[in-house]
Image (tube, rainbow, N blue to C red):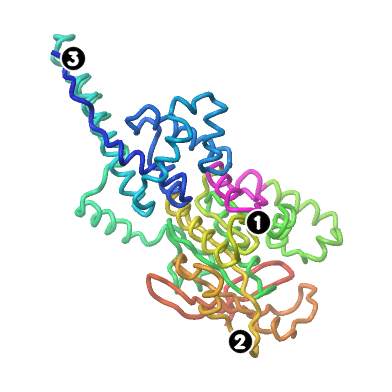
Amino acid sequence: MINSKPLPNNIQAEQSALGSMLSDKEALMATINSLKPEDFYSEKHQIIYGSILGLFNKNQAVDLVTLSEELKKKKRLEKVGGITYLTNIINSVPTSANIRIYNQIVKEKAVLRNTIFQLNKMRDLCFEDKDPKLILEKVQNIAVKILPEEEEKSLGELLKHTLISSSRGVKYRFKLESINKVLGGVDICETITIGGYTSQGKTSLALQLCKDFCEQGLRVLYCTSEMSEIETARRLLTNLQEKNIMDFRKGIFTENEKESLSELADLMVHTWKLEIKTVFSMADIKKCVYKYEPDILFIDYLQNLSRKEDKNDYQKVTHDMQDIQILTRDKEITTFVLSQLSRNKEDIRKPRLSDLRDSGAIEEKSNIVLFVYWEDRLKQQVMPRTGNEPPEKMEIIIAKNRDGTIGTVYLDYYPEFCKLANREY
């Protein structure tokens, strides 16, 4: 007797998930890594979600207009109910803030349907095969497929996992040991903001950390919206060779230096897992992250990214920081974001968290906020450097740390080499 009872599903949750994605970018980012087209029960919902993924992977906007056009090109718009149906699912969403709940319901129903399907296969084996050992082997293979890909951990398992991982400390360590002493390093899913006034050495610090992580064998993606890829690579070579950056600009090299630089370039190409990419928007950054799958992401710098749909700079930065936080957590990476601070109108002073509060949700979305402060540069007391002078003093002000210590770290800074080192006291 054939069971005509419908398989587990929740059409309303599927509609709410799709409608949220079409009206809210955060909902889209929260969904693309958790659901597959086949997780939807309705065939037309599978088609709609598949087209949404297609638009996202092509780095195109996802909304009612673009989705309708995409479906029309594929001659599938009418099959899903036309623009009227797409409009209805957008209007039927109670609130896109519940996107993770909608996704969870859709996923749970998909797991139940898969479980029923696999159990039916087990039942059929009992009739098709008489060898008990063979039946058991096949049943075990099928049983593995019943478990969801990302099974939720119980509270006990979660605490046990946390204890084990905590005993090892955070995932990544700095080579600048003085920063490690305060922060202990950085962890996956963390967003670290490096802030500072203009020409204070933010990029030098970022490139120093970039080099150090590359030397540890980590996959690093450096996204720059300020400099070209060649300029960024030149600064890395300056750091490695300890060759004055102005010599690079003027093309002043001895034959030995040219040979040494060539060897360094070969070393970087064959041993480092580094990608340097010029970006203009968060869409460019997302595309690069999905393509190169880094462990560590650098964004240099936040305020230089374009975002046409926002009315003012505050909205633009807030939305970009939200996207960065979601991307960082969904891809389980560590992200360093460089942020420009406007020069204060007061006397020369150190930057503080309040300098971020008019710039969007930077402080709120960051796990750690570091400020670079090069006082002599602000006072215009730095003379031209040839490479033989004592290092400058740079302060790294740890202004926010969700897990504990804040304070100030002092580093030696060699601006002509774009290099920072532990300070010799």
- Magenta span of residues: 267-291
Q: Nearer the viewer, residue 113 or 93?
A: 93
Identify the mark nearer the N-term, 3 or 2: 3
- Packing grade of label 1 (10 A; few <14, some 14-19, many >=20) is many
Magenta-colored stretch includes residue 289: yes
Q: Pointer 1: what residue?
A: 224
Horizontally, residue 189 falls left or right of residue 7, namely right
* Disc number placed over residue 349 in the picture, else none: 2
In this rendering, position of residue 358 left or right of residue 46: right
- Could you tell me which residue is drawn at 26 percent across and 39 percent down? 108
Residue pointed to by mark 3:
124
Q: Quadrant of residue 257?
A: bottom right
Whether residue 137 is visible to the viewer of this picture, yes or no, is no
Q: Residue furthest front?
A: 84
Q: How far is disc 1 from disc 2 in space, using C-alphas?
A: 28 Å
Secondary structure beneath label 3: helix
Marks 1 and 2 in Cβ contact (< 8 Å): no
At mark 2, the secondary structure is loop
Q: Position of residue 47 (x, y in %)?
A: 44, 29
> Residue 23: x percent and y percent?
46, 48
Query: Predominant secondary structure in magenta?
Result: helix
Q: Taking 80 as reference, is 188 above or below it?
A: below
Q: Secondary structure at mark 1?
A: strand
